[in-house]
Image (tube, grey):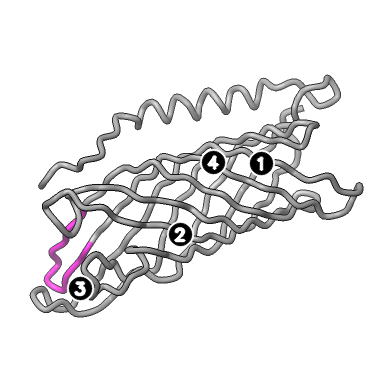
Amino acid sequence: MNATTIRNPAGPVLFALFALLALLVTATPAAAAGGPIPEVLLEAGAVVPLGDLGDDYEEPLGFGAGLGYQVGFRLRLQYASGWAVAPSFHYVKPRTRTGNDAVLGEIETATSMYRYGVDAQYRLPARPGAPSLFLTGGLAVVRDRLREDDREGQYFAESCNALAAAAGVGVRRDRLEITVQYEVNRFTTNRFWSSQNTGYNWDTISVRVGLALPQSFN
């Protein structure tokens, strides 16, 4: 197969980064000692494909992906100033397209993403016990994946890496939070529809619900 134009030797590096950040979270002093408050947040939600990802399969670069889901987690350090920082991982799975191809016949086109990110959050002041609004944004290394299967059992599978950005807004009450976020995921590769270097737009909008686990590091 052709080689992608985006090369990423970052697999081991990302794993080491996440391990280091997790260690920092677990080693953080308790809030009573003046340190940031660490928490683990479990998340799930819906993903709306945009750009080429959401375009009809009959479009030149369209993948025909539909409304899908994501699941993931983040390790967050919450500071008294209202700022927080968190490494995160999410698996994103748009709905698979099933249709007919002029050459291959019936075919399934599946897309998915692995997102390894770091984000910052600022929580606006609120009365004790009341919901609080927050703003969030960050960067991620995303593994964009494509697989096509035909009725004969043959398949085509490729993937490439991209640097993505995101920004969103949400609301938090107690341990529950809801976030609406726009993710910019654009890359150039020759692994997908064309053997030439081609730019793709896999932007998404996500709506996710997060649940913070009870404090366990203090």
> Under tag 3, what secondary structure?
strand
Circles 1 and 4 in contact, beta carbons < 8 Å: no
Of label 3 and label 1, which has the lower sequence position? 3
The chief SS type of the magenta part is strand
The answer to which of marks 1 and 4 sits earlier in the sequence is 1
- Residue 21, image x, y percentages: 56, 26
Name the quadrant containing residue 214: top right
Q: Nearer the viewer, mark 4 or mark 3?
A: 4
Instruction: Write the start and end of the magenta stretch as one range.
Output: 148-157
Q: Which residue does the image show at 21% across and 41% down from the upper left?
A: 5
Report the amino acid beneath label 1: Gln
Check disc 4 and give the amino acid type. Gly
Q: Secondary structure at mark 2?
A: strand
* 140 relative to 83 in the view: left or right: left
Residue at the disc numbered 4: 138
Q: Amino acid at mark 2?
A: Thr
Q: Which residue is mark 1?
A: 121
Q: Quadrant of the C terminus?
A: top right
Q: Nearer the viewer, mark 3 or mark 1?
A: 1
Dot 3 corresponds to which residue?
Answer: 107
Q: Position of residue 189 (x, y in %)?
A: 22, 48
Residue of label 2 = 204
Helix, strand or loop at label 1? It is: strand
**Distance Cα–Cα, label 1 vs label 4:** 9 Å
Work out how far the residue at label 4 is from the one at label 2, CA to CA, in angstroms.
14 Å
The residues tagged by marks 2 and 3 sit, at their Cα atoms, a distance apart of 24 Å
Q: Is residue 154 magenta?
A: yes
Q: Earlier in the sequence, mark 2 or mark 3?
A: 3
